[in-house]
Amino acid sequence: MKKTLKFAAYAAILAILPFATGLAFGKTWVRILDFALLYVMLALGLNIVVGFAGLLDLGYVAFFAVGAYCYALLASPHFGLHLPFWIILPIGAFAAGIFGMLLGAPTLRLRGDYLAIVTLGFGEIIRIFLNNLDTPYNITGGPQGIDLIDPIRLGSFSLNQPTSHTVYSYYFLFLLFALATAFVSMRLQHSRIGRAWAAIREDEIAAEAMGINTRNIKLLAFAMGASFGGLSGGLFAGFEGFVSPESFTLTESIMILSMVVLGGMGHIRGVIFGAILLSILPEALRYVGPLEQSLFGRIVVDPSSLRMLLFGLSLILVMLLRPAGLWPSPARKRELLAHGETAKHENANIYDAGR
Amino acid sequence: MDTFLQQLINGIVLGSIYSLVALGYTLVYGIMGLINFAHGDIVMVGAMVTLTVARLLADSGLPGPVILGIGVLTAIPACMAVGYLVERIAYRPLRNAPRLAPLITAIGVSILLQNLAMMIWGREYLSFPQIFPAQTMAVGGASISTIQFLIIVSSAIMMAGLSRLIRKTRLGNAMRATAQNPEIATLMGVHVNTIISITFVLGSALAAVAGMMVSAYYGIAHYDMGFILGLKAFTAAVLGGIGNIEGAMLGGLLLGIIESMGAGYLGTLTGGVMGSNYQDAFAFFVLILVLVFRPSGLLGERVGERP
Amino acid sequence: MTILRPLLVAMAAIFLAGCAKQKPGSEFVVKIGSVAPLTGPQSHLGKDNDNGVRLAADEINASGLVIGGKKAKIEILSEDDQADPRTATIVAQKLVDEGVNGVVGHFNSGTSIPASRIYSDAGIPQISPSATATTYTGQGFETTFRVVTNDRQQGAALAKFAMDTLHAKTVAVIDDRTAYGQGIADEFEKDAKADGAALVAHEFTSDHATDFTAILTSIKGKNPDLIFYGGMDAQAGPMMKQMRNLGMKMAFLGADGSKSPEFIKLAGTAAEGAYASAPGLPLDKMPGGKAFVEKFTAKYGKIQLYSPYSFDATMALVNAMKQAGSTDPARYLPVLSKIKMDGVTGPISFDSKGDIMHGAVTLYQVRNGSWTALP
């Protein structure tokens, strides 16, 4: 009984939240909430790769891009195709998953730091290709991007009509997908696959010795994480109506990684918290400008410099003081604390040349 | 043939700059096992400081090389200070933490440095004052400018000097010992913490010189210029074999030449399908290829051998 | 349950905040949004746009504004879109929420386009002072306008200049792979080829690049009469410098993104002799031009690039409101589409798509360290 009550309370809060926010702060903030939900999905996806399997991916935004462009190509005047979203989203997720495996395949033997750089390289390569595949055949629209993308439609009901309620409609759609993503994450974590990931994360050699096919498990981590990104990308394209390579930069990848790390790597609730925090904070800091103006009569510190400054500072501080994240799971906290046995053991591997 | 030669020269100059920056990466990685993402931003600091000094002295009537010299002599201590602070405050406490933590911290430091630079120097591209006459010498059918020549020569000198330092001096011995096994090194009387700090500071000094070169050569400096440069230099270090001094030099030169040639000839090679618009992807392609087929790099990794 | 309580508290706080929000005042305020990248590498140009808007607003307020028989005051809401498409949609939504009556912006084509959908859905007129991509007005929205010539018009004028005045027979094109740079470069290339020029090379760079030696060397080997660059001053300047350092003496032609004081600063002495275009007529040829230059420089310093256009855009919005006797977008939008007025950049009227009619393009050359208009 108590559980049902709790559940109902959460559901009620989530349902009322957009309207309360809209009334209190304006529709802009509902739009920001919508983006926050997209980031929650992205962070959960990356969490599978980084948090569950322990593979550092610095090019995650590429999968977001794949999903977004899939949607754009299949539901816009660009090729003249207008498939419904419930067909395109799985295609986008699947395509992203394939890319995830393509990324994973050559990196299986690489150590943490190298893996990070290679994934970063992949992310950049995909962005550059997206930016340039408009000659000789115009596939991606190049720097101009793809415009006039169909909004998401349920039958004859388009989420973009009426225009005053767009942000609310999309909120509920995104909420649905975010909840589903979180649910799938939780089930994965406690499944055999999830335990295999945990085994690889903690000690790959031992896991291999225990009979875990590390190669396949790693590829699976990349594929699953990527497909979440692809799903989120498709939703983004339908929401924005416009995609261009400028939205898929390295900075985005770092931002998503920060959400996972700051929130609490491997801890689903922590990751969600991190995603929401880092989506809302930069926007909240936008108001620092006028605040400074009213307090000091002039702008002392430029708000956007301040924003990135605080961001960089927070990354450093969290790593120094709370390396397991702001909301870690108790198990991971033990694992990630600097004095742990795991850390010492891992550091011994620095001297493994050419593994 | 002239174009080829010119592209080669351009590539060697670019490569010399990459080598210098790569050396800093490789030194730090060899001794700490850490990819210092912020290294490229220390180069940026060097570039900005040099540019500021050059601007202040541009009308003083001093000859070009002297202004540059003063600029670099100001930049080196500045970068060394930044490097030291970063190591002490952000990296040292994480000496025993799992790999991920210092990596994330390094990203944080990079962002911090970039934004501090933005607040100090502004967001615009800053131009380097014209203190060098645009003289060129003819080499074959190509031309090489004074500053290009200076870069190649001073890079080579510095790398030779560093190599000597590592191999022949007590400090160099201590650095290599620490890289191999810090615990045993401590037992042998090496102050590991000090050595690590010195390595960091040395890397930062090299970064300062690289920064001076970049701002003088391209004529501009910008708070954003460090990160990508650092990334490419890291690619160069990996290409040559991380932890390996000669590897960093070789990797840097090779990468510079590959990039230059790639940008120049990719269009011709692919029949116009891919052109110089893919030049940035080139460095990453190279990196991935190297890591897949020869993960220890061309000259082999030397991150300390197993006892 | 440990999270439920703080969550409930947060909800209550949000509700209270909503109740506590001030009711709008009863003054008649006309809100005009001004959006541009106020931070980042293009901030000097973004701020310039913003200053143009403010100059117009201050002038209008100083001379007393009356709309529909009532006294009114213009309030400018400046927003920073950081030249990022996603941020652009967020700030667009923000402005719509704050009930702006019109928007001058955005700066880049890549941001104006996604934002235009939001303004169009809300019925709010948007005049861009600097977005030149043809797609911007090609989306079929009623609310998109621009006071600057689009890429097609500019490209054609540039090609004509290259062929007829500079007598270039072979050209090389470089673009920076942004929506703006690629757009103008492609238009130029198309028109130049149609006019009979031979294209020897089309190279690429990016809007963060500093090293152009590789592509320039490649072009040098093909020895064209002219190099055209589609991109911004931050790259054009260093590119010019490196060109001359490589001993390349051919003509350099840029588009409006290059025609700024920043270009001259970055290229140094190498800037001498470079050509570029700018939409509209030169300021000193326009009746209000000289006065504008004086007023602007007194208040904000050197004119960077598009401030005269953002000034005109603001004037256009307000004039339309005055003529319609209302600040309600639904009422003054039809008047705006048919407006005929004289701005500092030239006569202002819009065609059916929202592009400026009879848009002029002027060619300039750097002479003695500053941009001089060519007859």
Image: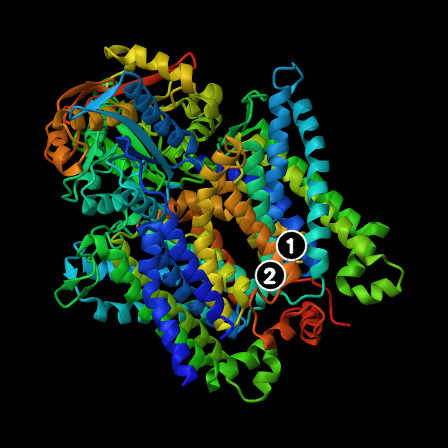
Mark 1 belongs to which subunit?
Answer: B
Q: Nearer the viewer, residue C364 or A23?
A: A23
Q: Which secondary structure lies at badge 2?
A: loop
Query: Tag 2, which chain?
Result: B
Colour logic? rainbow
Residue pictured at 58% horizontal, 40% vertical: B116
Where residue A342 sits in the image (x, y, percent)?
Answer: 67, 75
Q: As rendered, which of B267 and A65 lies closer to the eye?
A: A65
- Residue plotted at (14% across, 23% down): C358
Q: Which mark is residue B247?
A: 1
Say what amino acid the circle numbered 1 marks.
Gly
Q: Give the mark nearer the N terminus: 2 vs 1.
A: 1
User: Residue B219 in the image: x percent, y percent?
Assistant: 53, 29
Residue A166 x/y as whole percent: 24, 56
**Residue A49 in view here:** no
Residue C70 visible at all: yes
Contact between marks 2 and 1 (CB within 8 A): the answer is yes
Quarter of the image where the N terminus of chain B is located = top left
Dot 1: what SS?
A: helix
The image's mark for residue B297 is 2
Query: How would you rate the neighbour count of disc 1 (Cα within 10 Å): few for under 14, some for 14-19, many for 20 or more?
Result: many
The CA distance from mark 2 to mark 1 is 8 Å
Along the line of sight, the residue nearer the viewer: B258 or C279: C279
Relative vertical location of residue C360 with respect to residue B263 in this rendering, above or below:
above
- In the image, taking residue B209 as reference, residue B222 lies left or right, namely left
Q: Are marks 2 and 1 on the same chain?
A: yes
Say which quadrant the C terminus of chain B sits in: bottom right
Judged from this view, the residue extending furthest toward the bottom is A211
Please give left or right for residue B122 compared with residue C47 in the image.
Answer: right
Name the kind of residue labelled 2 in the image. Answer: Gly
Q: Residue at x 52, y 86 (%)?
A: A212
